[in-house]
Amino acid sequence: MIKESTMMKETTLKARIISPGIAIGKPFWVNEPLIEVNETRKIDIDTEVKRFDKQVNRIASELSELFLRISKEIDIKNAEIIQTQQMILADEGFKIKVINLISEEFIPVEAAVERVMKSFSQRLAASSNEYMRERAIDFIDLATYFKNQSIEESGIPDKEIDKETILIVGELFPSIVLTCKRLATKGIIARSGAPTSHAAILARSFAIPVLVNALDTWEKIGNGDQIIVDAYDGNITLSPGPQTLKRYRKHLQEQKRLNKEYKAIKRIRAKTRDETRISLGVNIERLDELHLFSPLDIDELGLFRTEFLFMFDQTNFPSYEKQVKWYEKVVKYMDGKPVTFRALDVGGDKFLPYFSMGKQNNPYLGLRAHRVFRYHPEILETQLRAILQAAKFGPVRILYPMINNLEEMDYLNGILSGIETKDLEFELGIMVETPASVFMIRELIQHVDFVSIGTNDLVQYTLTVDRNNENVMPFYQPFHPLILRMLKKVVNAAKDLDKPVSICGEIASDPRWTPLLLGLGIRSLSMAPLLIPPIKKQILSLNLVQCLDLAEKALATNYEIDVERYLDDFFARKGRKKNVKNS
């Protein structure tokens, strides 16, 4: 869809990052719905039913070809997203419902399919489980395939698009991502979309920058104007001026150079210029993420969030045997390097579609993690037995989340004590992610082998800020001196008792934080696999003495703005840009 260009001043909008990257180009608006369906036109039932069968066969054939093609380009597990739609298409219940609508209401194929898909979608969208709600999109997307000549066409005329285009869409569908890939366009801006959706996974696999922005203001932009998608910092820049364009083009060139540097340091161990060794680990939550890294490039798997295995593609709690297969696969993949499995952490913003915890007026302060096990200890007991079985194949660590006091530790260890652990080697640790655990750290740490600091929740609970609420994001301050002092308190306790301490929250993955964390005494960081290279590069450039001086200044101040200023000065003296997220 061509929109008139409306020249305006340079404007920057905040947006949610779905797939990282930077794109510069001209926007192209994708109409939705792509083709209007006329439900009133006269039809012949037999003709429509035959046409429906023909459409199903065509789409099924295209999906099969598409699966084979893209599975050669990305991890096959991500390509299986296409197979989900194949399964929907092959479902006899779906076919019967469509044929019944055609026969009883005398409506064309496209209208019947759309109605059935909307019905399926609405049921999923009403689910209390976020994962199930996100799957609703797959049904709506499949309905669009019946309206287009090709499942990768998305109603977009190729002749109107060149490679400098950024697609502007309402909903982030898998078909939109496939269109972007096929036409080699620069990126996507969507009005809605979720980071765990099938479309988002595809976009990340193809390295397509994607942002989501629900505001109406960016509709003012026309197809003739230029825009910038910054899916590292979460910014959309409309009508960028010459200096902004120059800066971002330099970013893109710099990124190409950095990718070469990252490749060169891939197998180099992380240590500061004055030889202080830093351990780097990865955080993952699904088995299909194992392909994102090699055990040779990291020191450990620092956090495996097991609850996501319980959430996806499950209709009940997974059996002991199924869990054993999961955990053994991970441990064997790490080939002798430690794996930290976090015990099931449901509640808060994570729910299981098959397990009700009743009404939660405040889920983050309600039934969560070990509190669930008070009512159902068998859930944890089964999981611990499965993890310990995997310990036969390599070093395993068990991590208890949301621990506040010794009573909670005693209860969980009571469950553990009922499991045969003879001849099994494993370590036990806790996540420090509440103010209570910080104040009790010296008592708690005596009962564990290690601690891991979850800074995301620690900041949220300490500063009483919902980290998922955009309205209060200015109050979510991970640089606040209070947070720094809490980190230092945990580090000092761990050092006094000779226990290792790591950070697995988001701040571990931001190079701007790295010198401050090292100065506070952190020697182990864990993050998403794709964020390891910039952190390692940062570490290799640092001098620990300078980091210690930075931390001392930051701990002495009472305002976050002063901490920010100290960081700016630190990088300015090193001749770097203030924003070093991608350096």
Image (cartoon, rainbow, N blue to C red):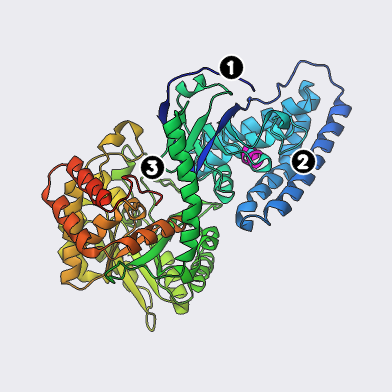
Front position in the image: 457 or 556 = 556
Check disc 2 and give the amino acid type.
Ile
Residue identifier under label 1 = 4
Say what secondary structure mark 2 lies in.
helix
- Which residue is at a point 41% across and 29% down the rendered structure image? 12
Considering only order in the chain, which callout, 3 or 1, is on the residue closer to the N terminus? Answer: 1
Check disc 1 and give the amino acid type.
Glu
57 drawn magenta: no
Q: Position of residue 128 (x, y in %)?
A: 46, 39
Instruction: Give the distance between the C-alpha atoms of the residues marked 2 and 3, in whole angstroms.
Output: 41 Å
Q: How many marks?
A: 3
Q: Work out whether residue 305 can be spotted.
A: no
* Quarter of image, res 544: bottom left
Q: How many residues crowd around disc 3 within 10 Å: few (fewer than 14), some, or many (20 or more)?
A: few
For the stretch drawn in magenta, the main secondary structure is helix
Say what secondary structure mark 1 lies in.
loop
Instruction: Give the distance between the C-alpha atoms of the residues marked 2 and 1, in whole angstroms.
Output: 35 Å
- Which residue is at a point 39% across and 44% down the rendered structure image? 349
Bounds of the magenta span?
175-180
Confirm or deny contact between disc 2 and disc 3 (CB under 8 A): no
- Which residue is at a point 22% across and 59% down the rendered structure image? 547
- Viewer-side label of 2, 1: 1
The label shown at residue 358 is: 3
Residue 482 located left or right of residue 213: left
Instruction: Give the distance between the C-alpha atoms of the residues marked 1 and 3, in whole angstroms.
Output: 51 Å
Q: Position of residue 412 (x, y in %)?
A: 30, 64
Residue identifier under label 2 = 59
Q: How many residues crowd around disc 1 within 10 Å: few (fewer than 14), some, or many (20 or more)?
A: few
Q: How many residues crowd around disc 2 within 10 Å: few (fewer than 14), some, or many (20 or more)?
A: many
